[in-house]
């Protein structure tokens, strides 16, 4: 059967998702931008469907879609009691934001959740309720109750939520923010302890539909292997250098003298072939290749220089595969295949 794979249909999450998948070798082909279907050549058994980000969560939850990419905030808001909805990869590395409680700057006496709880109680004693504008009623309700804010009204806001206090239809807001700039521009401040949820793009799946079809699981494995290896590779670079020495063993000994700079498992060493017509080994020189964490590039270069290296080059690493895909192993455990 065809694996049904849903992506956000518009906005920054759509653009970032397409860029991310392409970087993983999973380029989405959508020849007609007015159509809501697409394809991924790397996954010939998958049909790509484009939906609103919130609908991706709901359709994966009810099983009409097998897997999808959406925001973790929407997953938690719409998860409900759908036991078949599972998070297959919880952080794809983009779409980062926070769901926060923000009050007007003019509320100088309200700077923490405790202050807000006192204010809500004071409002209730005077016969009115604290009004909170949000697109995330489930998350906000649960968060407020868990922090002693018990009397309030949630105002559904599908427009510019940050404008609600200034327009007078809410007292404060609970909304997503990435940098806080929009909140500040609207004279709002995040209260201490007011971070409800930290979110990012994630890959979700339906437990039941994957359990029933091994072919779908095989396609999901391809996706997870590539995504996991690509995410892991982001923190590594490949270094190639010419190192002088009398033998492979001696060069290796010098390189691994700094074990933390000697690669994932150790260096790969080979004779340098002369550029002369004879094409024979260039006596006394060896090519050393190793993969190190990006943050250790300069220490690794300095170490190679200290043992006489020349011609040091740094190359990006596109994939780093482990002995198995941990994310796919977790998925199999979730769907009951381990």
Image (spheres, grey):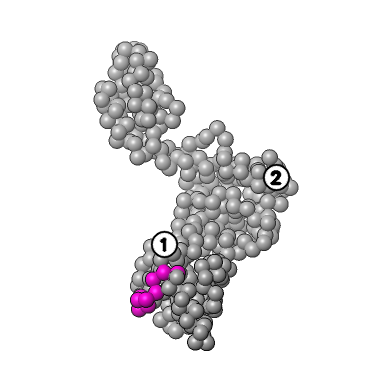
Residue 192: quadrant of the picture:
bottom left
Residue at image location 36% in from the left, 67% down from the top: 181
Image coordinates of residue 297 in percent, x first then y, are 33, 36
Task: Name the foreground residue: 244 vs 161.
Answer: 161
Task: Decide which of 155, 70 is in the foreground and name it.
Answer: 155
Q: Residue at x 53, y 61 (%)?
A: 73
Q: Main secondary structure of the magenta part?
A: loop
Residue at 68% across / 55% down in the picture? 84
Q: Is residue 59 above or below residue 262?
A: below
Magenta stretch bounds: 105-113
Q: Which residue is mark 2?
A: 336
What residue is disc 1 on? Answer: 178
Q: Is residue 172 visible?
A: yes
Q: Is residue 338 left or right of residue 26?
A: right
Q: Secondary structure at mark 2?
A: loop
Label 1: element kind: loop
The percent coordinates of residue 188 (x first, y second) are 38, 73
State the residue in front, 193 or 190. 193
* Marker disc for residue 156: none
What residue is shown at x 45% (from left), y 70% (from top)? Answer: 114
Taking the view exactly as shown, the residue that stands out farthest to the bottom is 127
Q: Is residue 36 visible?
A: no
The answer for how far apart the CA atoms under marks 2 and 1 are is: 36 Å
Relative to residue 265, is residue 332 depicted above or below? below
Q: Residue 132, image x and y in percent? A: 50, 76
């Amino acid at each position: 059967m065809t694996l049904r794979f849903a992506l956000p249909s518009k906005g920054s999450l759509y653009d970032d998702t397409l860029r991310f998948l392409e970087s993983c070798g999973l380029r989405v082909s959508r020849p007609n931008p007015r159509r809501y279907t697409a394809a991924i050549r790397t996954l010939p058994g998958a049909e790509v469907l484009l939906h609103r980000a919130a609908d991706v969560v709901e359709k994966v939850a009810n099983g009409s879609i097998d897997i999808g990419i959406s925001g973790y905030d929407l997953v938690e808001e719409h998860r409900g009691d759908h036991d078949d909805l599972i998070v297959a990869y919880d952080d794809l590395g983009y779409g980062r934001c926070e769901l926060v409680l923000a009050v007007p700057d003019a509320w100088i006496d309200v700077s923490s959740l405790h202050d807000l709880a006192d204010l809500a109680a004071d409002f209730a004693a005077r016969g009115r309720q604290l009004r909170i504008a949000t697109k995330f009623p489930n998350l906000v309700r649960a968060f407020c109750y868990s922090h002693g804010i018990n009397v309030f009204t949630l105002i559904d806001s599908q427009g510019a939520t940050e404008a609600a206090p200034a327009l007078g239809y809410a007292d404060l807001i609970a909304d997503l923010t990435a940098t806080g700039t929009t909140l500040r521009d609207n004279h709002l401040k995040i209260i201490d302890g007011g971070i409800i949820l930290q979110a990012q793009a994630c890959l979700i799946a339906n437990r039941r539909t994957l359990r029933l079809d091994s072919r779908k699981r095989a396609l999901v494995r391809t996706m997870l292997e590539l995504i996991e290896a690509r995410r892991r590779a982001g923190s590594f670079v490949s270094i190639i250098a010419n190192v002088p020495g009398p033998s492979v063993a001696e060069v290796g000994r010098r390189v691994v003298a700094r074990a933390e700079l000697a690669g994932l498992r150790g260096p790969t060493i080979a004779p340098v072939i002369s550029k002369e017509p004879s094409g024979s080994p260039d006596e006394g020189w060896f090519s050393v290749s190793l993969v190190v964490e990006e943050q250790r590039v300069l220490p690794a270069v300095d170490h190679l220089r200290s043992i006489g290296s020349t011609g040091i080059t740094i190359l990006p690493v596109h994939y780093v595969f482990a002995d198995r895909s941990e994310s796919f192993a977790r998925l199999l455990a979730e769907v009951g295949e381990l």
